[in-house]
C-alpha cells in the first residue's frame, strides 16, 4: 500500500525538515539544513523584492513614455555594498560611483515597500518643468529625472536595515546613468 501526500502537506514536510535539526535516514545528524532553508528563503525574498523594484520602475517609466528597464544583478550588488557601508549611520550619501543613483531613507518598514519608495521618487515629476528642463525653485526633481532617463536600460536596488534603530536605507543604481547637465531625461539623441 503506498501513501501519497498532497502538494500542501509535501511542502510543509519539506519546510519542517529544512528548519529542523534532524537526522538522515542513516541516523547521521545534518545541522546545516536550517541554514540551507534560511538561505533559500532569503534568496526568495530578494528575488521578490527585485521584481517589486523593477515593476515599480517600469510602471513609472511607461506612464512617462520611456522604455522599460531590466534588472541587473551587478547593479544590485553595487547598491547593496554601498548600502552596507552606510548601514552604521544610515546617511544618505551618494557613492560617487559611475552609475546613476537614487537613495531613500525611511524609519518604519511596514509602511514603505519598494513600490512606495519608487512612487515617492516619481512624485517629484510635479517639481520638474520640461520647458526649462529644471526643477521648480527650491524643489527636488533629480530622483524623478534619473528614474525616467530615456537612455537608462538597467536598474539594481538594495535595502538594508540600519544599525541602532535608525531605519532603512534604499539605494538604486542605474546604467547608463542620467541627469546630465543641459540634457532632458526624454531626449532621443542620448
Image: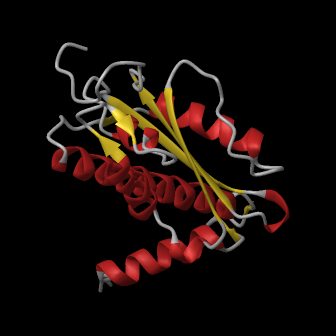
Where residue 128 appears, as percent x and y from the top left, is: 34, 43
Where residue 152 appears, as percent x and y from the top left, is: 32, 27
Foreground of the two, 144 or 82: 144
Q: Is residue 150 above or below residue 168?
A: above
In which quadrant is the C terminus drawn? top left
Figure label count: 0
Which color scheme is applied? secondary structure
Left or right placement of residue 95 versus residue 118 in this view: right
Foreground of the two, 42 or 147: 147
**Quadrant of the image occupied by residue 6:** bottom left
Residue at 18 percent of width and 34 percent of height: 67
In which quadrant is the N terminus drawn? bottom left
**Quadrant of the image occupied by residue 105:** bottom right
Q: Is residue 171 above or below residue 187?
A: below
Where residue 174 appears, as percent x and y from the top left, is: 43, 30
Residue at 40 percent of width and 54 percent of height: 118
Residue at 36 percent of width and 57 percent of height: 123
Residue at the farthest top position: 189
**Quadrant of the image occupied by residue 38:** bottom right
Q: Is residue 164 above or below residue 187?
A: below
Left or right placement of residue 63 versus residue 6 in this view: left
Residue at 65 percent of width and 61 percent of height: 33
Where residue 182 appears, as percent x and y from the top left, is: 36, 18
Foreground of the two, 52 or 100: 100
Amino acid at each position: 500500500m503506498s501513501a501519497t501526500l498532497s502538494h500542501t502537506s509535501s511542502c510543509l514536510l519539506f519546510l519542517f525538515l529544512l528548519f529542523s535539526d534532524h537526522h538522515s535516514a542513516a541516523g547521521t545528524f545534518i545541522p546545516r539544513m536550517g541554514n540551507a532553508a534560511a538561505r533559500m528563503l532569503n534568496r526568495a525574498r530578494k528575488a521578490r523584492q527585485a521584481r517589486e523594484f523593477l515593476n515599480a520602475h517600469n510602471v513609472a517609466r511607461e506612464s512617462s513614455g520611456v522604455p522599460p528597464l531590466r534588472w541587473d544583478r551587478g547593479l544590485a550588488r553595487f547598491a547593496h555594498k554601498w548600502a552596507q557601508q552606510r548601514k552604521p549611520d544610515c546617511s544618505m550619501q551618494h557613492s560617487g560611483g559611475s552609475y546613476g543613483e537614487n537613495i531613500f531613507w525611511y524609519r518604519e518598514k511596514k509602511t514603505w515597500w519598494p513600490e512606495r519608495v519608487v512612487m515617492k521618487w516619481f512624485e517629484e515629476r510635479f517639481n520638474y518643468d520640461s520647458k526649462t528642463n529644471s526643477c521648480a525653485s527650491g524643489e527636488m526633481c533629480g530622483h524623478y529625472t534619473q528614474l525616467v532617463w530615456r537612455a537608462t536600460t538597467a536598474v539594481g536596488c538594495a535595502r538594508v536595515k540600519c544599525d541602532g534603530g535608525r531605519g532603512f536605507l534604499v539605494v538604486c543604481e542605474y546604467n547608463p546613468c542620467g541627469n546630465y547637465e543641459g540634457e532632458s531625461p526624454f531626449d532621443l539623441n542620448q
